[in-house]
Every structure is written in structure tokens, then in C-alpha cells.
Amino acid sequence: MQNKVVVITGASSGIGKALAEKYAAEGWNLVLAARRIDRLHALEKKLDNRNILSVQTDVTRIEDCKSLIEKTIGKFGRIDVLINNAGISMRAIFEEVDLSVLHKMMDVNYWGTVYCTKFALPYLLESKGSLVGVISVGGYVGLPGRTGYSASKFAVRGFLDTVRTENLKTGLHVLVAAPGFTASEIRKSALTANGTQQGETPRNENKMMSAEEAAQHIYNAVKKRKRKIILTFVEGKATVFLSKIWAKLVENAMYKIFASEPDSPLR
């Protein structure tokens, strides 16, 4: 794997950071993208791998995404895997949320995936590589208090499913990975109704799947060239399955789960 190159967005924390650690351990060349360049440099030192390129990237900016791919090709000359992991969440009911929050969800989660994919696609086609999108169970089931988040994840799933279909004859592999609740910083940085960061997670992170476990599942799925993975049984696979045959049950369950959170925006 010494010549293989993986590009990971949102690599400064959570699943992205865990993916970087996993791919480094497997001997891959890494390109790490995030807004917080200081965290990426700290991760470089921890991994002690000379074959790492860190690029400060705001995926909502087309020019940043283009530059990320150009710098990757400039250093390594190829891309074998692109993992669109950068993401942001929210916690507010639609009635109260400022529309700018919904725009932010789409800009980061959806358009960030589109931009990076657009510029990386020629190189992925050349290597017959893997295009990955990290979504959420919220990309299959509407999560109350997360209208913009779920909408953006549904959009990413639709986008990647279509790219896969367009490339049935090219050798491109497309994976849609949907973790359940995973311990990460995403709930701390989630936006409230007025666009400010929540700051504290409303859920018990200790009971969630670890970012490292999620990264291992995603790594294995890429290696096996799977089309999709849904992680965790109850919150993931069972929820998605039941939503197809007993939608009202799932809606009621989702409402109860999110309404029980401390300071829930649900009434």
C-alpha cells in the first residue's frame, strides 16, 4: 500500500482523525484536510509518517477544494480513495431555526462533498479508486430537531448513489457509510437555532460507538468495495429497516429519543 493515496476531509477530529490513524497504520500516503491546520500538524507528529500532506481546507469554498486536490496530485501524483467526512450538525426545530443554519448544513455536508468529488473524480477514474461519503442514519430517517442535517445527508446519499450509477462501466467504487451515534465532537460544535455552537453534547458519549470502531468498519468496507454500510444494530440497521415497513413506529421512537435529551428543543 506504500504508493496508495487517501484524501480525508474533516480529518482534525472524530471519525476523520480515526480514519487517518487507521490508514497511516496500514502504510498509506495521507492527505489530511480540515480548517484547523494546527490540529492536522499535531496529528502528523503523532503519526510520525513522512508521507503525509496536511492542507488547510474549508470545504464550503470551491477554491479550497480545488486546491486540496491540486496539492495532492502535486505531491503524490494520484488519488486512490477520497473520503468525504467533513460535516456539521444542528439542534433546533424548523419553526425556530434561522435559515442561515440550514444553508450552513448544506454548504458543509452536501456542497463540500460535491466540490471535493468534482475535482478528484478524474484521478479516481484513472486509478479505479474509491469515492466515499460519510453520512448518518439521519440520511435515511428524518431526525427531529435536525431538519437541515438530515436533509443534507439525504442529499449526499442521493448524489453518491447517482454518481455510482453513472460510473457502472468505469470501475469507480462508491461507498455510502452511515454511522449511528458515534462519539465525536460533532454534537459539541452543532449549531443552535441562532447559529451559535451548542458547546456541550446532550447525549452520553460513553455509550456510543467509538470513532476508531467506525473508522475500522469504513476502512474494511472500502477494502471490500462495498456499496453501503449502516453501523450499529438498533440505532442503525434496525431503524433503517423498520422505517421502510413501519414508518410511524420509527417516527414516534425518534421523537421520544430526541425529546428526552436535556434542554431538547422539542416540546
Image (cartoon, rainbow, N blue to C red):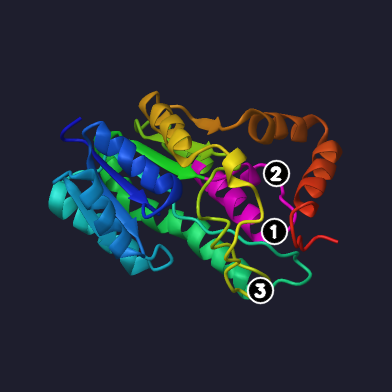
Provide residue 161's location: percent of width, then percent of height.
Answer: 52, 40
Task: Bin the neighbour count of mark 2 within 10 Å (Cα to Cα): few under 14, some 14-19, many 20 and up.
Answer: many
Label annotation for residue 147: 1
In the image, what residue type sits under mark 2? Val
Residue 125 on image: x %, y %: 30, 39
Looking at the figure, which quarter contains the C terminus?
bottom right
Whether the magenta-drawn stretch holds residue 157 is answered as: yes
Q: Is residue 132 above or below residue 32?
A: above
Give the residue at x 65% y 53%.
Answer: 150
Label 1 vs label 3: CA separation? Answer: 11 Å
Q: Which residues are magenta?
A: 135-160
- Compared across the picture, whether 253 is left or right of 35 comes to right
Query: Percent from the top left, x then y, of residue 98?
Result: 68, 75
Left or right of 37? Residue 100 is: right
- Checking the image for residue 141, the label placed there is 2
Q: Amino acid at mark 1?
A: Thr
Where residue 162 sits in the image (x, y, percent)?
51, 42
Circle 1: element type: helix
Question: Do residues under tags 3 and 2 come within 8 Å of each other at their CB atoms?
Answer: no
Instruction: Identify the residue under disc 3.
Output: 99
Q: How many marks?
A: 3
